[in-house]
Amino acid sequence: MMEALEAIMTRKSVREFGYQPMPEDTLKKLLAAGMQAPSGRKGMPWHFVVVSDRGALSRVKEFHPHAAMAADASVGILVCADTTNKKSKEYFAQDCAAATENILLAAHALGMGGVWTGVYPNEQRMESFRKMLDIPAHIAPVSFAVIGFSKKKEIAEPRYDGERVHNEKW
Ligand SMILES: Cc1cc2nc3c(=O)[nH]c(=O)nc-3n(C[C@H](O)[C@H](O)[C@H](O)COP(=O)(O)O)c2cc1C
């Protein structure tokens, strides 16, 4: 397994998958990584809807064209927030974003690939996921992490930019 900094620096969005089913132990590790994320006031507002059904994964593109790659993925993990969680009121989107990135990094470290597809705050995508997956109204779908086996080896370009760094003051 990759060490943390290597995983961060070499991760890249993967959008072309050769279908293989998701190994059960890998899925558990991805979900555990998601739940290990930091969250405001330790509110942990997240819930994860795991979609492995290939028919369902193919239908996502009907309402989210930028998630069409899900059709060949092993799994889609819809990272959702419970909006009734009082601790997480203002922070649920950031909390779920942190969980999503943890999932993507864990997938990469374990030899799989994935891509974050945006859901919140797009009402139409949120409502379509709610309908498709029987999600109650107080649950906000925040992101759909699409994970699978990459068709090709992707190389991440370095993005460090010293001009974005301000020492002590702007
Ligand atoms: C909030 C958010 C929403 C995104 N939505 C999509 C999406 O709907 N479809 C997609 O293919 N990629 C999506 N991406 C992935 C970005 O396009 C990608 O991270 C960016 O181009 C940088 O490339 P990299 O991930 O390979 O470093 C999203 C990323 C974020 C953080």
Image (tube, grey):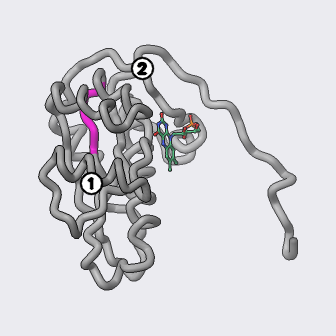
Decide if residue 97 is on the left or right side of residue 47.
right
Q: Inspect this view and state whether residue 21 appears.
A: yes
> Compared with residue 62, is residue 130 higher up or lower down, i.e. above or below?
below
Q: Which residue is mark 2?
A: 16
Locate residue 119, reporting x and y percent.
39, 50
SS at badge 1: helix
Decide if residue 40 is on the left or right side of residue 48.
right
Query: What stretch of residues is rendered in magenta?
Result: 73-77
Q: Earlier in the sequence, mark 2 or mark 1?
A: 2
Task: From the image, give the main secondary structure of the stretch colored magenta.
Answer: strand
Quarter the N terminus occupies: top left
| Three-letter code, disc 1 | Ala
Locate residue 67, reporting x and y percent.
38, 33
Quarter the C terminus occupies: bottom right
Locate residue 70, reporting x and y percent.
32, 29
Identify which residue is drawn at 33% across, 77% down: 43
The numbered disc on residue 32 is 1
| Three-letter code, disc 2 | Glu
Disc 1 residue lies near ligand 1 with CB under 8 A: no
